């Protein structure tokens, strides 16, 4: 008898986590690897947030919280959504989870039936597709290329919709590309959605505050779509709180109740201490963390200029987040000694083993001709990584 279920055997492993582990393994052997595989800010959590957590410990926030989160924390999130996004939600429309990843998974499991089609622009965040597969849905990928800043058009969206379409999932600013839709572009997509009322949209806005060009716009602020958009956000990226594990969604009351129900069986509530830390983040002026965004903006220029100068790398200039997603297929077929580069995975392994720089192949994000590099690292490490990559690429013939 087979021990493991088909469900777990068919679930793919996260390539970002896998590459980071390979990087740690090499470091453990004394090899200095610059890890650009994980999307984790290299800043410490701000002191005012840590102070709120310490206060929560002293005030004994150590018991089970309500499954959807503490009322006052959800109210703080509602006020943040009104302040920053022009969105009106009541606390009972908000569900706090152990990271935005769980928020998205909750929504997918609550909405997708076997055989339902879920439209996802590609490149996409690594877990979207596996989440849909786990729910036994069918992923419909809509390709966006570097030449169009990795953004799909209304015409592409319309062409992907069928009678089986149930859900649309996207992020803006995007992981892995750093592309970000403008208000005009989102309103144009919104006109398509308005013609197809059976489609629900998950809008992943976790990189909302890490934006360099243009102003963030939330799709749920379009009145005709408000009840059909699930807005997902969290504190991990903008507030350097990845390990605190707090994300949230805001949705119609029906969807919020469904997500609370499923979370009640899977994990129950997120940590009460982390919730109180997140409350401090929600109540803060986003300007409090502008120093991080300014640092990322500087690093974007270092990475964009550096990678664009490497033959075989085609880059766009990211509008947000902290990733570059260069097209590298011009290097496929090249060799270094007995090593041949047939695809992005080969190139990433070559860069890891020869340049000692950890990156992630684009295949993990639905774009086989690309690789992802995070610039959530020091200026010094980024410049060193670019130099190492350039030298390694020069050895390819």
Image (cartoon, grey):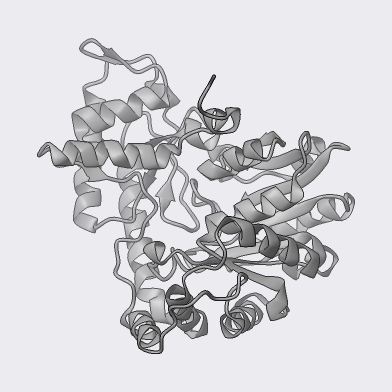
In the rendered image, the residue lying farthest to the front is 1
Could you tell me if residue 148 is visible in this image? yes
Residue 320 is situated, as x and y percent measured from the top left of the image, at: 49, 58
Q: Quadrant of residue 90?
A: bottom right
In the rendered image, the residue lying farthest to the left is 30
Front position in the image: 93 or 372: 93
Quadrant containing the C terminus is top left
- Is 229 drawn above or below residue 127 in the view shown? below
- Is 18 drawn above or below residue 295 in the view shown? above
350 left or right, relative to 197: left
Q: Quadrant of residue 217?
A: bottom right
Q: How many labels, in total?
A: 0
Could you tell me if residue 173 is visible in this image? no
Quadrant containing the N terminus is top right
Front position in the image: 105 or 126: 105
Residue 87 is situated, as x and y percent measured from the top left of the image, at: 70, 76
- Is 204 drawn above or below residue 222 in the view shown? above
Front position in the image: 393 or 129: 129
Picture residue at 33% right of the left edge, 15% below the top: 334
- Is 63 drawn above or below residue 110 in the view shown? below
In the rendered image, the residue lying farthest to the top is 338
Residue 206 is situated, as x and y percent measured from the top left of the image, at: 53, 62
188 left or right, relative to 268: right
């Amino acid at each position: 008898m087979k021990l493991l279920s088909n469900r777990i055997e068919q679930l793919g492993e996260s390539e970002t986590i896998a590459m980071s582990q390979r990087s740690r393994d090499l470091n453990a052997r004394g090899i200095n690897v610059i890890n650009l595989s994980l999307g984790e800010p290299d800043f410490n959590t701000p002191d005012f947030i840590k102070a709120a957590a310490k206060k929560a410990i002293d005030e004994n926030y150590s018991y089970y919280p309500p499954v959807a989160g503490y009322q006052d924390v959800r109210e703080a999130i509602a006020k943040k959504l009104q302040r920053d996004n022009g969105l009106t939600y009541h606390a009972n429309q908000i569900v706090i989870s152990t990271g935005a990843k769980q928020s998205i998974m909750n929504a997918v499991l609550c909405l997708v039936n076997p055989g339902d089609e879920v439209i996802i622009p590609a490149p996409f965040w690594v877990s979207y597709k596996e989440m849909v597969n786990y729910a036994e849905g069918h992923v419909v990928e809509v390709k966006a290329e570097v030449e169009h800043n990795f953004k799909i058009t209304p015409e592409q969206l319309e062409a992907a919709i069928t009678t089986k379409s149930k859900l649309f999932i996207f992020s803006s600013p995007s992981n892995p590309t750093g592309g970000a839709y403008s208000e005009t572009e989102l309103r144009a997509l919104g006109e398509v959605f308005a013609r197809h009322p059976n489609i629900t949209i998950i809008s992943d806005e976790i990189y909302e505050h890490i934006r360099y060009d243009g102003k963030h716009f939330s799709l749920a602020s379009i009145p005709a779509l408000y009840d059909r958009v699930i807005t997902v956000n969290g504190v991990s990226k903008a507030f350097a709180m990845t390990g605190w594990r707090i994300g949230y969604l805001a949705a119609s009351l029906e969807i919020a109740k469904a997500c609370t129900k499923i979370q009640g069986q899977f994990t129950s509530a997120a940590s009460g201490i982390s919730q109180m830390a997140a409350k401090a983040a929600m109540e803060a002026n986003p300007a409090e963390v502008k120093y991080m965004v300014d640092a990322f903006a500087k690093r974007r220029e270092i990475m964009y200029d550096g990678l664009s100068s490497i033959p075989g790398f085609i880059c766009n200039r990211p509008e947000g987040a902290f990733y570059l997603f260069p097209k590298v297929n011009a290097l496929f077929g090249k060799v270094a000694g007995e090593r041949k580069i047939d695809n992005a995975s080969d190139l990433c392994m070559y860069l890891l083993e020869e340049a000692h720089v950890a990156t992630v192949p684009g295949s993990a994000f639905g774009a086989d001709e690309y690789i992802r590099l995070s610039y959530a690292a020091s200026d010094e490490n980024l410049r060193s990584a670019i130099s190492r990559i350039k030298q390694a690429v020069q050895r390819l013939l």
